[in-house]
Amino acid sequence: MDMYYDKFLHMLEEEDKENCVEFALSKLESGEIDVITLYKEILEPSLNNMTCKLSEKKICVWKEHVRTSIVRTILECSYPYILKEKKKNHVKNNKGKIVVVCPPEEYHEIGAIMAANFFILNGFDTIFVGSNTPKEDFIGAIDYIKPKYVAISVTNYYNLVAAKNIIKEIKNTANYPIQILVGGYAFNSNPDALYQIGADRLLQTYEDIKKFGEEG
Ligand code: B12
């Protein structure tokens, strides 16, 4: 997989969107790479290992945006392959409804999109809401959708406070036992934040989600 990663990274560094998208989709189409491997071993490290050269300091955020936009296009285009994989494995939507959301002011959403697709692959009836979801809208929707789980993705650890507030309101609003799952970069160096913000469970990887689904 290292060879594929190096090739992809080179094209990404060149900001060659056309070839990045074509490369990823052709590997999925031929079956050389499955969606989980594409996400885990190519797309995720291509963003998380991103560094900024001192000489490019002024355009760092610009570069982050361009890179994310290329990865995001690939993620959106991979959706039919998620469905194909799900069908191939005879996965039924029988694990309950889950809403995947980012707290207010959290604009990092690539991890949340990947997590949402991992939930789909494991039989969860998944609704991806997206980044920076306003608290009021989200709380209002809880009553209407009545999900069994809410999965909150937090990347910037400053947004743990917003996550804590939203969890408190969800628990006060839902008049049924609702489970709050969390994940994202903010928990990598501080997994105990899970308890501090009042969530029920921390999941990070595809394997964590698979295991969680198997628990019933
Ligand atoms: C891309 C990126 C951006 C993009 C985001 C675009 C988008 N639409 O998502 C842009 C350019 C907008 C951005 C902005 C900012 N960013 Co930024 N960004 C990144 C970068 C390079 C990659 C993040 C990413 O997408 N990773 C790829 C995904 C796939 O990985 P992941 O998030 O870890 O997700 C995996 C798991 O965690 C899991 N997962 C994630 N969520 C969930 C949820 C559940 C329920 C489950 C089960 C699993 C799960 O699933 C994924 C697959 O395994 C990181 C670098 C880094 N080291 O992380 C910085 C980083 C996250 N950013 C950072 C910062 C500081 C910012 C800014 C404040 C400043 C800036 N650089 O402009 C703004 C803040 C915007 C805001 N208010 O939120 C810091 C955060 C530090 C901190 N305080 O915690 C980082 C770490 C960079 C750094 N080293 O300083 N950023």
Image: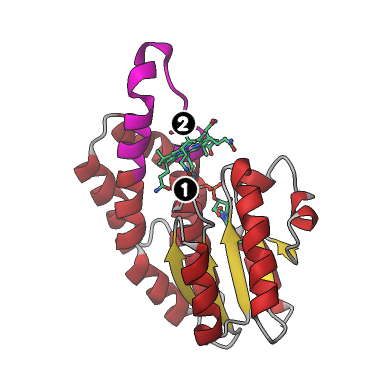
Of 202 and 136, nearer the camera is 136
Q: Is mark 1 within 8 Å of ligand 1?
A: yes
The C terminus is located in which quarter? bottom right
Of 144 and 152, nearer the camera is 144
Q: In the image, which disc is placed on residue 49?
A: none
| Colour option used | secondary structure
How many numbered dots are placed on residues in this image?
2
Dominant SS of magenta comes to helix
* Residue plotted at (52% across, 64% down): 135
Query: Would residue 39 appear left or right of 143 to someone viewing this image?
Result: left
Can residue 173 be seen here? yes
Query: Mark 2 or mark 1, which has the lower sequence index?
Result: 2
**Residue span colored magenta:** 47-68
Of 130 and 63, nearer the camera is 130
Secondary structure of residue under mark 1: loop
* Residue plotted at (65% across, 81% down): 174
Of 43 and 89, nearer the camera is 43
Q: Residues within 10 Å of mark 1 (few under 14, many from 20)?
A: many
Residue 92 percent across, percent down from the top left: 52, 87
Quarter of the image where one finds residue 113? bottom left
Q: Is residue 61 magenta?
A: yes
Q: In the image, which disc is placed on residue 108?
A: 1
Q: Is mark 2 within 8 Å of ligand 1?
A: yes
Q: Which residue is mark 2?
A: 50
Q: Type of residue at label 1?
A: His
* Residue plotted at (27% across, 55% down): 26
Secondary structure of residue under mark 2: loop
Query: Would residue 42 appear left or right of 21 to someone viewing this image?
Result: right
Residue 190 percent across, percent down from the top left: 74, 43
Q: Residues within 10 Å of mark 2 (few under 14, many from 20)?
A: few
